[in-house]
Image (cartoon, helix red, strand yellow):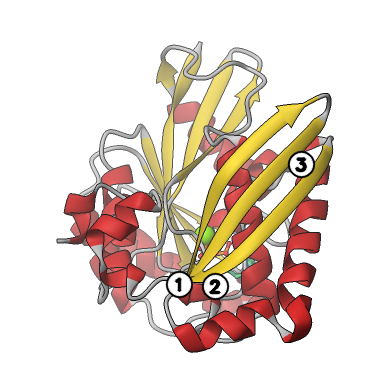
Amino acid sequence: MKSGFVAIMGRPNAGKSTLVNALLSKTVSIVSPRAQTTREAIMGILNEKDKQIVFIDTPGLFVPKEALDKVMVASARESAKGVDAVAYLVDGSLESMAEDDALIASLKISCPLFICLNKIDLITAPIGEATITHFKEKFPSAQVLPMSALKNFGLKELKNGLLAVMKEGPQYFPADSLTDKDRSFQAKEAIRFELLRFLDEEVPHQCAVVVNSLIEKDNHVKIEATVFSEKKSQVGIVVGKGGDMIKKISMSARHRLETQFHEHVTLVVEVRFLEGWRDDPSKLATFGYGKSDDAK
Ligand code: GDP
Ligand code: MG
């Protein structure tokens, strides 16, 4: 069979998670208008007759400031190693491509590279064409494709392009699997998604979610999770008046998980204060973000 790994790379917010979900027609990775929604690499698996592509959705590439940022960028760069192809997404709606030029060059990609000019639904045809020409000249060995992950444009071309460069290989995952992540991970991400949806500004970025237990019994999944807030003052915001906010968040997350699992879900979420977790490599490792070495 033909198989291989494809890293989806690019700056935060370029549309990487949207692309993976669209390619698989399923939500494997959470998407939000905010940068740095994806904190660690997630695999999405495309199964076709005699073919399997494992997409690695990565946290964005940027210049890291805090330990969590370092772990995220290290995780993204790590994903580019040893893959069979890279799809690098450019946010076409941004004016400057200089940062993307530098990032693509810094990755030193030796496998087939597809530069995807995403969000073309937001730009005019002449600008799109000029940008495509720019990347073709800059990276002559790459295939440059216009795309809208959101509007489902150009995805078939990318998929066919990728299938064409996959080599003979093993079936890495069972043919019915969609992601490498287990239900605990999905529960954590569903809660993070709702935190991003309901809370303003920096609050969700300063929260970590830990699933303490997940018990499956008779088509019923019972989950207990904790939201750790980095700032004491924000615990109240996450909990809300009379617990309103956390109730809203856990109810929405529960609905989301019920549609994903096709089973009844009970979800209990508590909120706690944990000082400075984002800048503490050992705490980051506890939350599953990277090897603790990445942050140093
Ligand atoms: P990531 O950080 O690269 O994973 O980006 P996301 O997939 O989380 O998307 C970031 C934002 O861009 C979300 O609001 C998406 O809905 C939006 N987005 C992604 N692809 C497109 C696209 O093709 N067109 C438009 N207009 N928006 C898009
Ligand atoms: Mg993402």
**CB under 8 Å between callouts 2 and 1?**
yes
Q: What label does residue 128 carry, if any?
A: 2
Q: CA distance from mark 3 to mark 2?
A: 36 Å
Label 1 CA crowd tier, 10 Å (few <14, some 14–19, many 20+) = many
**Of residues 52 and 235, the one drawn nearer to the viewer in this rendering:** 235
Label 2 CA crowd tier, 10 Å (few <14, some 14–19, many 20+) = many
Q: Where is residue 69 shown, x and y percent of the image?
A: 31, 68
The correct choice, above or below, for 219 with respect to 111 in the image is above
Instruction: Tell me which amino acid carries mark 3.
Output: Gln
The correct choice, above or below, for 54 with respect to 239 in the image is above
**Of residues 182 and 12, the one drawn nearer to the viewer in this rendering:** 182
Q: Is residue 229 left or right of residue 102?
A: right
Q: What label does residue 131 carry, if any?
A: 1
Label 3 CA crowd tier, 10 Å (few <14, some 14–19, many 20+) = some
Q: Residue at x 46, y 84 (%)?
A: 232
Q: Is residue 289 visible?
A: no
Q: What label does residue 230 carry, if any?
A: none
Instruction: Tell me which amino acid carries mark 2.
Output: Gly
Q: Can you say which quadrant of the picture contains the C terminus?
A: bottom left
Badge 2 element: helix
